[in-house]
Amino acid sequence: MAFSAQTEKYSGKMGTLTFGSGDQALTVGGQAAMPFGSFDGELPNKAVIAMEVYDVVNPEWPAAVVDPFKDVINDPVAWAKKNVEEYGAKAICLQLTATDPNGENKDAAYAADLVAKMLDAISVPLLVWGCGAVEKDAEVLAKVCEVNEGKNLLVGPAVEENYKKIAAAALGYGHAVVSQSPIDVNMAKQMNILISNLGLPMDKIIMEPSTAALGYGVEYSYSVMERISLAALAQNDEKMQCPMINDIGKECWKAREVMLSEKEEPGFGPDQEKRGVLWEAITALDMLIAGSNLLIMRNPKAVKLVEECIEELTA
């Protein structure tokens, strides 16, 4: 008797999001099946990795993520160009750490000008990520949207405390928004509803359901993302059909297993760089299998590993 593979057909389909402009624009999402399940349905767009660039680097970063960029690490525009030209980045994520009120407290005009310079220097789509201070992020990201009108940036994260100003600016000036919620399916849905109620179309929203690193709560992120995917596909819940994004690098490269040397923790072994690369790559793969469409990553070797896995799994 011939083997007959069991397949699952879903009534729903994940929406798409396009960011960037012109020939370099990228589209993510659109899947009609669970991750890499091409035997169940169409998977029209491969997951994309955006490589990080920081305007200010934490001095405690380990050598594994400083050395690849040591010649450009104090120049975010040159760093972005290196990621594109040398490491083949398909998108760039600018992390606006310098705007943090508890740090350098750079103003919104500084951020908008830096984004404009970066757009002029690179040919790939740009994500702009706030510092995490909700009031300051609203001010900064609104200004970024205004000054860079029509560039179809992906800006965020927008959270419950500041989504109105960020989403309104994105709507008014032609950009897309990252909708972030704290590891909860219902809160992820609620954020999508709140943002779309302001008039921003669903195809201009991507969800960040909160990212946790390997060993630091990754199972919670995985579980919520998988449930979001099932709600979108099996239940055809249109408010859950936005693609998903994960901020991987920021979470992975602060884990103690990555930060501590063999001298500090002999049981971790001598190859701190390899340990960190694998920590980031495995976390990224976990998120992809959970349903992520767009990853923000830091180390070029980790990016290469994950891109090779994406190609193999979608071949």
Image (cartoon, rainbow, N blue to C red):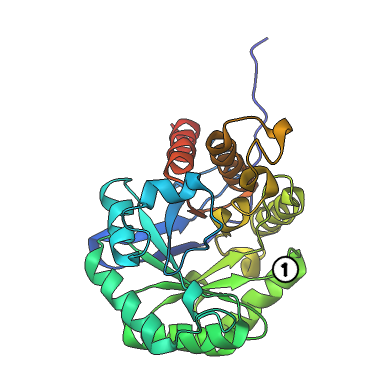
Q: Nearer the viewer, residue 262 or 34?
A: 262
Q: Quadrant of residue 170?
A: bottom left
Please tell me whether residue 24 is drawn above or below residue 282 in the rendered image: below
Q: Position of residue 248 (x, y in %)?
A: 57, 54
Mark 1 surroundings: few (<14), some (14-19) or many (≥20) residues within 10 A: some
Q: Residue furthest top?
A: 1
Quarter holding the C terminus?
A: top left
Please tell me whether residue 278 is drawn above or below residue 103 in the rendered image: above
Q: Nearer the viewer, residue 56 or 33?
A: 56
Q: Position of residue 201 (x, y in %)?
A: 49, 77
Q: Position of residue 122 (x, y in %)?
A: 26, 62
- Which residue is denoted by mark 1 in the rendering? 182
Q: Nearer the viewer, residue 201 or 117?
A: 117
Please tell me whether residue 100 is drawn above or below residue 274 in the rendered image: below
**Circle 1 — which element?**
loop
Q: Nearer the viewer, residue 49 or 116?
A: 116
Name the side, left or right, on which 154 lies relative to 123: right
| Tally of numbered discs | 1
Quarter holding the N terminus?
A: top right
Name the side, left or right, on which 125 lies relative to 216: left
Q: Quadrant of residue 251?
A: bottom right
Q: Residue furthest front?
A: 263
Residue visible at 27% across and 59% down?
Answer: 24
- Specify whether residue 151 is in view: no
Q: Position of residue 272 (x, y in %)?
A: 58, 37
Give amino acid for label 1: Pro
Residue visible at 52% across and 53% down?
Answer: 293
- Specify whether residue 97 is in view: yes
